[in-house]
Amino acid sequence: MTRSHGSTPGAGQNRPWLNSLQRGRVPGPRLPQQRVVDGAGQSTRSVHAGTYEDPITGAVGTPVFQSSTFTFTEDTYQAFDQGDIRDVPIYGRYGSPNQWAVQEKIASLENAESALVFSSGMAAITTTLLALTNRGGHIVSSRDVYGGTYNLLREDMHQLGREVTFADPTDMESIRSAVRDETQVLFFETLTNPLLKAAPLAELGELARERNILLVVDNTFLSPIFLRPLEYGANVVIHSATKYLNGHSDVTAGVASGPRKYVDRIWSQMLKFGGSLDATMCFLLERGLKTLALRMRRHHENAVTVSEFLAGHQRVRKVHHPSRADYPYPWLAEMCPDGWGGVIAFELAGGDEAALKLLDHLHLPVVATSLGGVESLISLPFNTSHSFLTERQRGEVGIEPGLVRLSIGIEDAQDLITDFDQALSAL
Ligand SMILES: *Cc1c(COP(=O)(O)O)cnc(C)c1O
């Protein structure tokens, strides 16, 4: 299996710092004790890549190095002297064995040279977008992005001298016409919440290359098991690791992956913004990731089965899921032949009132926000993620009354179906 580092745009007149970042780079950071897995499948990488093999104890998993600072050695001084301080343990915010272990695992899964973990998905997004743009720059994105990201783009970016244009994330014409000479970044989600709109990633990659723009994508909904955006021309791929990557609804974390050239630049921004990830959270994330491939397959199978059941139920008006025949974005199945994760949206007859009642009658899914956990989570966009929009604005992005957002867990599909059957019958 060869490593793909995404496409490298030419020296950008919009990004003068790129020219100063051409010196030689090695993948990582890595310690010599870390396992490097090349040429293996995604399950093998999930389990083994990046593990720190402790030479003293022979511990099978990465120990927790709960230390905020590390003893100076000749290597440290040499790193200071040569300016490659990202590669030696110095100080917790700069990097640590636990960060490097989990970063190596994610980089391996993404086929990336380097990855950088953060204290949340939003820390990853904020830091990356500010690292890769500068004053006077322009970003093209969409109104369908995650609420926190949308608020950052709408409320903060212009204060920081970056303009943002929102385009239809599924329509290349709309995206192309939003691009200007000053455009530095295209920022899209590979699959959106809650309606699962799929970005035409290969065409976005082509546009980015043609126009010398960086393509940054949020791949939270698909995970690297189903899609590795760097292989389609994305320059940086971001995740809210809080969701599928960790998978157990017990860690808040984020990650950005890509060629070292970009991740090193994002790292130096992270040093200033400070959103680094604590050692114990890295340990939990690394442990969660070991079952990523296994979990994603189960999420996918359950989502297909439950979608089928919901679509056949008389109280359900419409199911938004890539497995349905009327799913409008055929390029998703071409890019992701193995699956699409576990998020389903469906519209109930009877509008939001019926949707609220459904939540009352369900026993298994937990009524809570977030997604990607082993337990099914269910919520309504109208009174949570999209409550800041008017009913008309919700209609414009396709959120009709009665819409329910379901993140399918890894329970037995039949138990979920039995529960939905009784709850729908009680409406
Ligand atoms: C949850 C989420 C985020 C934000 O991540 P946090 O870890 O909550 O900061 C960003 N993008 C998407 C698609 C998400 O689902």
Image (cartoon, helix red, strand yellow):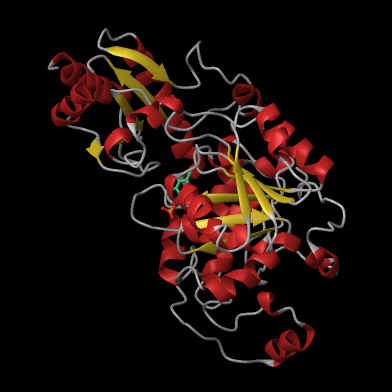
Residue 289 locus on image (x, y percent):
48, 51
Between 262 and 141, the one nearer to me in the picture? 141
The answer to which image quadrant residue 28 occupies is bottom right
The N terminus lies in which quarter of the figure?
top right
Tag count = 0
**Is residue 300 shown to the viewer in this render?**
yes
In the rendered view, tell whether residue 38 sits above or below residue 176: below
Say which quadrant the C terminus sits in: top left
Quarter of the image for residue 195 reads top left
Residue at the image point whose x is 83% and y is 50% from the top: 9
Q: In this view, does 242 lie to the left or right of 161?
A: left
Q: Position of residue 53 (x, y in %)?
A: 57, 68
Image-based side of 89 in relation to 378, left or right: right
Q: Where is residue 276 in the image (x, y as percent from the top left)?
A: 50, 70
- Is 415 positioned to the left or the right of 297 in the image? left
- Residue 23 lies in quadrant: bottom right
The residue under the point 18% across, 24% down is 353
Task: Please state which of residues 427 and 349 is positioned toward the viewer in this rendering.
Answer: 349
- 137 or 329, which lies in front? 137
Whole-percent x and y of residue 250?
33, 55
Vertical side of 296 occupied by 160: above or below: below
The answer, for residue 33, to whether it is visible in the render is no
The image shows residue 413, relative to residue 270, as above or below, that is above
Classify 198 as above or below 316. below
The one of 412 and 371 positioned closer to us in this rendering:
371
